[in-house]
Amino acid sequence: MLADPIIEFMQKSGISLSVADARADDVPLIAVNAAFENLTGYSNDEIVGRNCRFLQPEGGAGPVRERMRTFLVDDSVKEDRFLIPNVRKDGTPFLNLLYMTKIRRNGRDTFIIGSQFDFSKHDRRGHDGYDETLRKDIRELGSLAGEMGMVTLGTFRSLANSAALIAEARLD
């Protein structure tokens, strides 16, 4: 399943992280960290084994879902970011800036790493903290994956896109 170094990495991260199994039907979540639990209000036991769609509002996430489906099935797309309406366990809606990258092993997508940020809060300090923490985490994840014979795909372009989206929000 998921190697201990990646689980340890996730648990010490200050940003919301999730891992989904890209090989399984419906791409279920197989691990989340405490920051993810805090963001969504759901416990690990309520999350693992489910597709992250359960966080979407009753009417769905709209057109962004098609882009997400394309990301999952298109081998030429290595990473992307999505702005998705989500709902916490207590019913509170929030706008989720989701950054996803594929982890590949033996030439096959194995895991999808997701990083979530509550974009509905336009607090500059939160954006700065997320941006810097994500940058550090991506470097560490790339190093860990390389040590384990895995390849992180993309990452830096999506990080730049996410940082640009955050910068645009600061201008509003």
Image: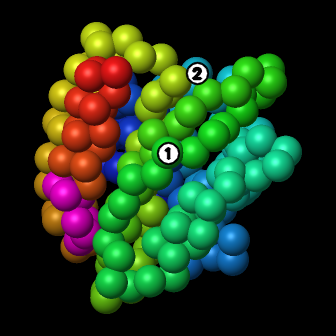
* Marking on residue 123: none
Local SS, label 1:
strand
Question: Is residue 41 visible in the rendered structure shown here?
Answer: yes
- Crowding at label 1, few (<14), some or many (≥20) Cα neighbours within 10 Å? some
Residue 157 vs residue 13, the one in the foreground: 157
Q: Is residue 108 left or right of residue 19?
A: left
Amino acid bearing label 2: Asn
Q: Is residue 156 magenta?
A: yes
* Residue at x-position 71% and y-position 42%: 55
Amino acid bearing label 1: Leu
Please name the residue that numbered disc 2 is placed on: 38
**Residue 75 higher or lower than 91, as above or below:** below
> Which residue extends farthest right?
58
Span shown in magenta? 151-157
Instruction: Say which quarter of the image contains residue 151.
Output: bottom left
Q: Position of residue 92 (x, y in %)?
A: 73, 21
Local SS, label 2:
helix
Q: Is residue 124 magenta?
A: no
* Residue at x-position 17% and y-position 65%: 146
Work out whether mark 1 precedes mark 2 in sequence or the reverse, and give the earlier one: 2
- Crowding at label 2, few (<14), some or many (≥20) Cα neighbours within 10 Å? few
Q: Quadrant of the C terminus?
A: top left
Question: Is residue 114 visible in the rendered structure shown here?
Answer: no
Q: Position of residue 21 (x, y in %)?
A: 55, 67
Please name the residue that numbered disc 1 is placed on: 83
Q: Position of residue 81 (x, y in %)?
A: 39, 53
Q: How is the image coloured?
A: rainbow
Q: Position of residue 171 (x, y in %)?
A: 26, 22
Instruction: Say which quarter of the image contains residue 154.
Output: bottom left
**Residue 148 higher or lower than 7, as above or below:** below
